[in-house]
Amino acid sequence: MDSIDHAIIAELRRDGRISNQDLARAVGLTPAPCLRRVRRMEAEGIIRGYHADIDPAAVGQGFEVIILVNIENNNHEATSGFERRILAMDEVVEFRRMFSQPDYVVRARFADIEAYEKWMTNEFHRDPAIMRIHSHITMKVLKDEK
């Protein structure tokens, strides 16, 4: 990747719906070579997709919680089962396995604290692999990947 590829990526991060013509102009190329570069980066998996930036509060998911999880056993069977169950939960928007403590970081969104409490009690807490949970309620998102 060269500096032009990095410039293309920066522009697409800023506006994923930018036209090829405007993108080419922004990075100092003509449209044809710009499009070839974008297509190459798509084919190589550098550009993995284009996504809408949705306001969570506008769709009833304005209450965000970061959940730190330690599981009982770190063997393959326990971790794969836990991961499969968490990945199936619609409320979970980000899920990471960590190298040290905690074992996992989960970011989930809800309509309000009541919805979170119900989900935590009825679904999350019932997972047999979980040993310890620490929840952190987001006060304000200051910077997010966009």
Image (tube, rainbow, N blue to C red):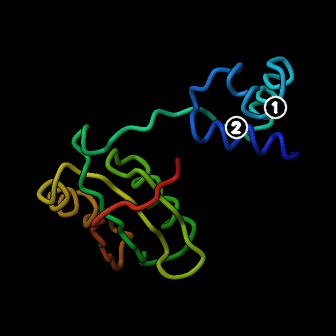
**Position in image of residue 79 (x %, y %):** 51, 66
Rendered view: 39 above or below 69: above
Please provide percent x and percent y for residue 101. Answer: 50, 82
Describe the element under mark 1 as helix, strand or loop. Answer: loop
**In the image: residue 120, left or right of residue 44:** left
Residue 63: which quarter of the image?
bottom left
Please give the name of the residue rendered at 35% of the width and 78% of the height, measured from the top-left corner.
131
Q: Nearer the viewer, mark 2 or mark 1?
A: 1
Against 135, is 21 above or below? above
Q: Are marks 2 and 1 in contact (CB under 8 Å)?
A: no
Which quarter shows the N terminus? top right
Real-space CA distance between mark 2 and mark 1, rounded to the nearest whole angstrom: 20 Å
Q: In the image, residue 55 lies at what x, y percent? A: 33, 41
Q: In this orientation, which residue lies closer to the viewer: 82 or 16?
A: 16
- Quickly name the residue at label 2: 47
Which residue lies at the image location 47% right of the left edge and 78% below the top edge?
Answer: 102
Rendered residue at 39%/59% (across/down): 107
Say left or right for 19 vs 134. right
Of labels 2 and 1, earlier in sequence is 1
Instruction: Specify the amino acid type for callout 1.
Output: Gly
Q: Element under label 2?
A: loop
**Residue pointed to by mark 1:** 28
Which numbered tag is attached to residue 39? none
Closest to the observer, 62 or 117: 62
